[in-house]
Image (cartoon, grey):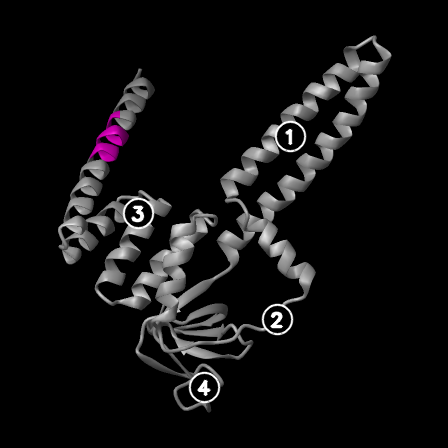
Amino acid sequence: MRIFFAIILFLGFSTVKADDNMILLQEANKDYNEGSYSEAAELYQKVIDNGYESAEVYYNLGNVFFKQNNYAAAILYYEMAKKLDPNDEDIAFNLKIANSRIVDKIEPVPELFYVKWWKTLVNTLSVDQWGTLSIVFFVLLLIMLTAFLLSQVIWLKKSAFWLGLLFLFGTVFTFTLANQKYKSFKNDHEAIVFTPTVTIKSSPSENSKDLFVIHEGTKVKITEHIEDWYEIKIANGSVGWIKADDIRKI
């Protein structure tokens, strides 16, 4: 009985929380349309703090900061939106525009064609979409396996066998892509520089050698972490150390 009431209370709390988020989103959208960007940003942030995460919310928050000419914050939230919905053309377009407004124009290191092709394929769908596709192929595989084992008709048995092999390949292939996408989603630590001008160091120390300078809005990849320092790599392959306070993780 206690478990039953606990479930009822949890479902009721979740429903109330979802309703609160919807109200906050409506108010945020209203403020955005009226040009009250600071108020809209606060409301969108409240929704995120409540545990609600979606590409739409991050995209809207990115638009708010873009309207305020805060391009580093706009890029951060566009990148967050892109992680959740990699195929959204509006997100990609606005991110490209925001990147055109920052100081650094870093040419990326050319990738081998098969590495580029694989990354493009992985990023074609989100983690959930690849996972769903993998489940669909697996269910079809089970259906073909059942047909192969139970059918007494030769042509049907052969068809089930070859289709089963096809669905087995599809299951393994899409599961591999889903797993790769999940790992990149969780383990690819990227960040946006939030300090106007940052001197990158050769080691995690203020007294170490200056290597190069980057500016706010630049995306970096985090490769190591020591206390309040991060080792980062930028698009052209240059590596160095930056203070944790100078960046915000995507």
The earlier-in-sequence mark between 3 and 2 is: 3
* Residue marked by disc 2: 110
* Quarter location, residue 65: bottom left
Q: Sequence order check: which comes first, mark 1 or mark 4?
A: 1
Decide which of tag 2 and tag 4 comes sooner along the chain.
2
Query: Between disc 1 and disc 2, whose residue precedes?
Result: 2
- Tell me, yes or no, whether the two marked residues, 3 and 1, touch with CB atoms within 8 Å: no
Q: Which residue is mark 4?
A: 212
Q: Residue furthest right?
A: 154
Question: Looking at the rendering, which quadrant does residue 115 occupy?
Answer: bottom right
Q: Residues within 10 Å of mark 3 (few under 14, many from 20)?
A: many
Q: Secondary structure at mark 3?
A: helix
Q: Check disc 3 and give the amino acid type.
A: Val
Residue under the point 28% across and 56% down: 63
Compared to residue 150, the image places residue 53 above or below, namely below
Query: Neighbour class for label 2 at 10 Å: few (<14), some, many (≥20)?
Result: few
Could you tell me how far apart the alpha carbons at marks 3 and 1 are, in whole angstroms? 32 Å
Foreground: 48 or 152? 152
For the N terminus, the quadrant is: top left
Quadrant of res 54: top left
What predominant SS class does the magenta segment belong to? helix
Identity, as a three-letter code, of the amino acid under mark 4: Phe
Q: Which one is closest to the eye, mark 3 or mark 2?
A: 2
Q: Which residues are magenta?
A: 12-19
Q: Which residue is identified by label 3? A: 57
Q: Residues within 10 Å of mark 4 (few under 14, many from 20)?
A: few
Q: Are marks 1 and 4 in contact (CB under 8 Å)?
A: no
Three-letter code, disc 1? Phe
Q: CA distance from mark 3 to mark 2?
A: 33 Å
The residue carrying mark 1 is: 137
Amino acid type, residue under disc 2 in the picture: Pro
At a point 24% along the width and 25% down the height, the residue shown is 12
